[in-house]
Image (spheres, rainbow, N blue to C red):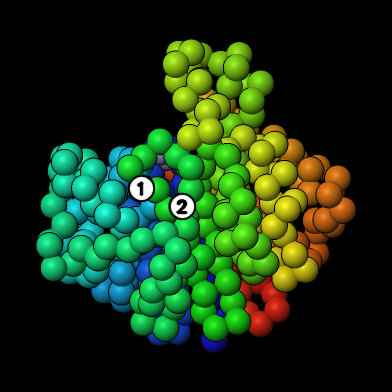
Amino acid sequence: MGTNVCVLASGSSGNCTLIHTDTTTILIDAGLPGKVAVERLLAADVHPSDIDAILITHEHTDHVSGLGTLSRALDIPVYASEATWKALDANPRVCGPVREKNKRVIAAGELFNVKDLAIQPFPVPHDAAGPLGYCIIDGARKVGIATDAGHATQEMKQQLADCDLLVIEANHDVEMLMVGSYPWALKRRILSDLGHLSNEAAGEFLGSIVTERTSNILLAHLSKENNLPELALLTVIAILRLNGIAVGKDLRVGLTYRNRMTRPIKIEKGYCKVC
Ligand SMILES: [Zn+2]
Ligand SMILES: [Zn+2]
């Protein structure tokens, strides 16, 4: 028993997260080449044919580049908002075709099920057509995922409060971004309300949603140019401590990676175990 979470990749070069229980296996986003996704699934002890569904957050290439290949090979349902499907249909080269019979339209606020998992999609502010974050609920266990969010909304706080495990974006350090080599227009986009969450913003957000139940936080979508893994960790942990949240034995804060998978994390009743 338990809910298992493994982030197979996270960042602007590809995003894919595996969540599986004894009965149900899903992927959140499919931004890895098919071959790499399969290798990492096998390394996480999951056979690709076990995947029941793919949930898409939004249509940006780093979240869907492997979607067409994977969904056609596995012939499984793919869930995305209506606006995301429209954007993908308007630009089919982003991920290649998904079979019509496998397209499922979901809407923010409307709970749905994939076998034994209840999934709650919610809106996130990002410069995409209809971006979503997800809470995945397996009985008593709750996993929350929100990346690619320009700021933390009240609704995100409500949805993501009291999760066992959180995957939250810590994209950039604001000073590194400001003095870095990105063109000004791109800097403005990243810093905007529809861009990406900074380390500080992630820390403040996490400080408002972590509860005694929360035992694991994974920082996601770190920028290669405008962040350092240690800086993201130290910033978030410092802000959590300022908010009176003790990071250590009962609450772990860890990283996700652009070029490799995290260690699988198993959530059992009341605690998370890093396998
Ligand atoms: Zn992204
Ligand atoms: Zn994006």
- Three-letter amino acid code at the position of disc 1: Gly
Left or right: residue 49 versus residue 201 is left
- 160 and 203: which is toward the camera: 160
Q: Do the residues labelled 2 and 1 touch (CB within 8 Å)?
A: yes
Res 130 label: 1
> In the rendering, at what x and y percent does residue 198 appear?
62, 35
> In the rendering, at what x and y percent does residue 113 appear?
38, 77
Whether residue 97 appears in this view of the structure is: yes
What kind of element bears circle 1? loop
Q: Is residue 251 above or below residue 154?
A: below
Whether residue 37 appears in this view of the structure is: no
Report which quarter residue 269 is drawn in.
Answer: bottom right
Q: Name the residue under label 2.
A: 123
> In the rendering, at what x and y percent does residue 110 appear?
41, 68
The N terminus, quarter of image: bottom right
Residue at x 31% of width, y 58% of height: 80
Left or right: residue 136 versus residue 255 is left
Res 234 label: none
- Three-letter amino acid code at the position of disc 2: Pro
Q: How busy is the neighbourhood of tag 2: few (under 14 within 10 Å), some, or many (20 plus)? A: many
> In the rendering, at what x and y percent does residue 217 appear?
65, 57
Left or right: residue 18 versus residue 252 is left
What's the CA distance linking mark 2 and mark 1? 8 Å
Point out the quarter of the image occupied by ligand 2.
top left
Residue at x 19% of width, y 53% of height: 68
Residue at x 38% of width, y 73% of height: 112
Left or right: residue 27 versus residue 84 is right
What kind of element bears circle 2? strand
